[in-house]
Image (cartoon, grey):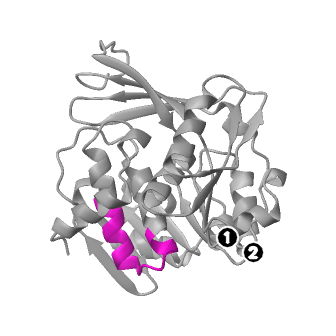
Amino acid sequence: MPSASDLSRPRVVVVGSANLDFVTRLPHLPAPGETVLGEAYSTAPGGKGANQAVACARAGGQVAFFGALGTDPFAEPLLASLRESGVQDWTLRVPAPTGAAFISVSETGENCIVVASGANATLRPEQVPPLAGVGWLVLQLEIPLDTVLAAAQAAKSAGARVVLNAAPARALPAELLRQVDVLVVNEGELRTLAGGGELRGCLRHVQDLGPQTVVVTLGERGCLALSGETWTELPAHPVQVRDTTGAGDTFVGVLVAALSRGEALASALRWAVVGSALACGREGAQPAMPWRAELEEALSHWTGA
């Protein structure tokens, strides 16, 4: 567990999940009851929390990751990826299996994912580290919800801004949404929170629940954001899609890296859109995440609005 003095170092702290991804590539995703022969099989570091920390660090963010790993060999590649990407390791080691994700990826880059939480499910509210001196806290929903809420409350008490990626999709308590400054969701997650209706109406509805800024990622249609009364809409960055695994996590991590160094929202969204596109053009989650120099190069050639 880090001490309060340790927390003056990172600008960003990510509290969330870490999984070892087991990835199988298939001609197509199976229908219920169907068996499909895979073409290739691999393992790679993943988990929404660790993914977002890695994406943030590679994009230039000063970031620490707090989560739980088992004492089994599966934890080692996760720790190595954090270190190699420049993420400060604040993980706990617990007597439970390291989390695992079983990912099937089709020839078109679509995926389906099953997560076995393992150690991630052991994170308790009282284990949330002190957050004095932290500028931004990033959260997702692959750890217990009471721990997510405790972390958000601790961040607000410390004067930090809270970014919540409300994934996987689920209903959320009003108290949590009131702690959130920036909410990032995909279209399905947005509709889980807002119900039916047209897209902009859904964003306004969710904003009324607490977050000042709501961002919805729209895949090949780019993204749409509402901050206060200001709308920002960006097209997708063109890319030949190979694998969408980790694209949303890359978007979040790159977005927070840009915000944490003082970029305005519209500029930060450009970084995030380009980052997620670059990740889609490669295979895997963390292995596909771009570094800042790659982002700068891609941005210099992009004519997106």
The tally of labels here is: 2
> Where is residue 282 shown, x and y percent of the image?
28, 40
Identify the mark at residue 158; answer none if there is no mark. Answer: 2
Residue drawn at 49 percent across, 48 percent down: 85
As measured in the structure, the alpha-carbon distance from the residue carrying label 1 to the one carrying label 2 is 8 Å
What type of secondary structure mainly makes up the magenta span? helix
Picture coordinates of residue 279 (x, y %)?
A: 32, 48
Q: Residue at 31% of width from left, 18% of height from top?
A: 40
- Please report the residue visible at 79 percent of the width from the left and 47 percent of the height from the top: 124
* Residue occupying image coordinates x 79% and y 28%: 95
| Residue 66 vs residue 118, the one in the foreground | 66
Which is in the foreground here, disc 1 or disc 2? 1
Instruction: Tell me which label, 1 or 2, sits earlier in the chain.
Output: 1
Residue 29 image point, x, y percent: 30, 26
- Res 285 seen here: no
Q: Is residue 290 left or right of residue 79?
A: left
Evaluate if marks 1 and 2 touch, with contact meaning CB atoms under 8 Å apart: yes
Would residue 36 appear left or right of 103 to someone viewing this image? left
Q: Which of the 4 image quarters holds residue 221?
A: bottom left
Which amino acid does the dot numbered 1 rest on? Answer: Val
Task: Report the residue marked by disc 1.
Answer: 134
Q: Nearer the viewer, residue 210 or 68?
A: 68
SS of the residue under disc 1: loop
Specify the quadrant of the image occupied by residue 179.
bottom right
